[in-house]
Image (tube, rainbow, N blue to C red):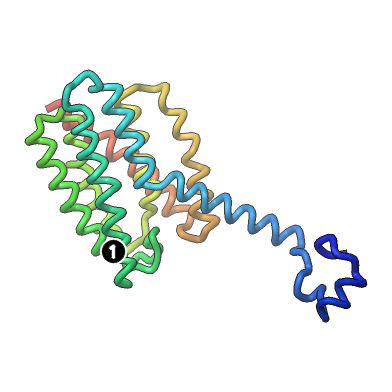
């Protein structure tokens, strides 16, 4: 019996019924389930999702009493989520990128270059709005780090997912201290996801996560100390 249909009816209704509706072997079904889970992880722990959540936490926890707190967050949100999503959607629409994750290294140069400008513009807005140095520094060093990623991308494919996620954890850590480092437990999960989906190899994810955390930690620490 296949799909709960008696064999007599199978053969009467559809010739070669089994060849059309045979259940997948368990190993293929498990692989498909793992792939769906890996894709879900990559979409949930995504730069345009994780970064604004981290920024909202930082703004509300550190500056929630300030009258312009939400305005500062809106600039951050527009710079790191709205602009990138619109840009990538537009580039995919005209065929400049093949998918929303920009899987191919050769297609990353133009969007990264535009995002440098977006973050610089956001930084200037934050300065004009009198934002704290911590918040304006986020966009300033997003621009600096995007230039770094852009230069690396010319020769190698670093994981932007891991770089952005680790950078966001670094910012939350600088805001709230050691207790927030439990978020690093999600880094191996995201690494596995990107490797399983064949978007990156182990070194590309490891370097992305390590440099993302180290760079943002050092940059913001130096910036707020000036």
Q: Is residue 132 left or right of residue 182?
A: left
Q: Which residue is found at the position 88% from the left and 77% from the top?
A: 12
How packed mark 1 is, by other alpha carbons closer than 10 Å (few <14, some 14-19, many 20 or more), is: few
Picture coordinates of residue 220 (x, y %)? 22, 33
Residue drawn 62% across the image and 53% down it: 34
**Residue at the extreme top of the image, as rendered:** 65
Place residue 98 in its image quadrant: bottom left
Q: Which quadrant does the N terminus fall into?
A: bottom right
Q: Position of residue 82 (x, y in %)?
A: 27, 49
Identify residue for label 1. Answer: 90
Horizontal side, residue 34 vs residue 87: left or right: right
User: At 73% from the left edge and 59% from the top edge, which residue is drawn?
Assistant: 27
Q: Residue at x 31, y 54 (%)?
A: 85
In the picture, which quadrant includes the C terminus? top left
Residue 13 relative to residue 197: left or right: right
Question: Horizontal and vertical percent for residue 143?
Answer: 20, 47
The image shows residue 110, relative to residue 130, as above or below, that is: below
């Amino acid at each position: 019996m296949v799909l709960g249909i008696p064999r007599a009816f199978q053969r009467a209704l559809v010739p070669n019924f089994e060849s059309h509706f045979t259940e997948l072997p368990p190993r293929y079904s498990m692989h498909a389930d793992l792939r769906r889970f890996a894709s879900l992880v990559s979409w949930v722990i995504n730069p345009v999702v994780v970064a604004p959540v981290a920024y909202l936490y930082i703004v509300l926890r550190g500056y929630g009493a300030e009258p312009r707190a939400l305005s500062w967050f809106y600039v951050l949100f527009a710079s790191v989520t709205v602009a990138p999503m619109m840009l990538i959607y537009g580039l995919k629409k005209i065929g400049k990128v093949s998918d929303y994750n920009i899987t191919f290294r050769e297609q990353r140069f133009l969007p990264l270059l535009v995002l440098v400008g977006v973050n610089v513009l956001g930084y200037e807005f934050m300065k004009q709005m009198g934002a704290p140095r911590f918040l304006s520094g986020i966009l300033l060093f997003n621009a600096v780090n995007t230039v770094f990623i852009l230069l690396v991308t010319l020769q190698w494919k670093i994981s932007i997912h891991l770089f952005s996620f680790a950078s966001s954890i670094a910012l939350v850590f600088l805001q709230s201290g050691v207790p927030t480092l439990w978020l690093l437990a999600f880094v191996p999960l995201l690494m596995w996801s990107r490797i399983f989906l064949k978007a990156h190899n182990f070194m590309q994810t490891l370097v992305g996560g390590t440099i993302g955390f180290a760079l943002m930690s050092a940059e913001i620490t130096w910036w707020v100390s000036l």
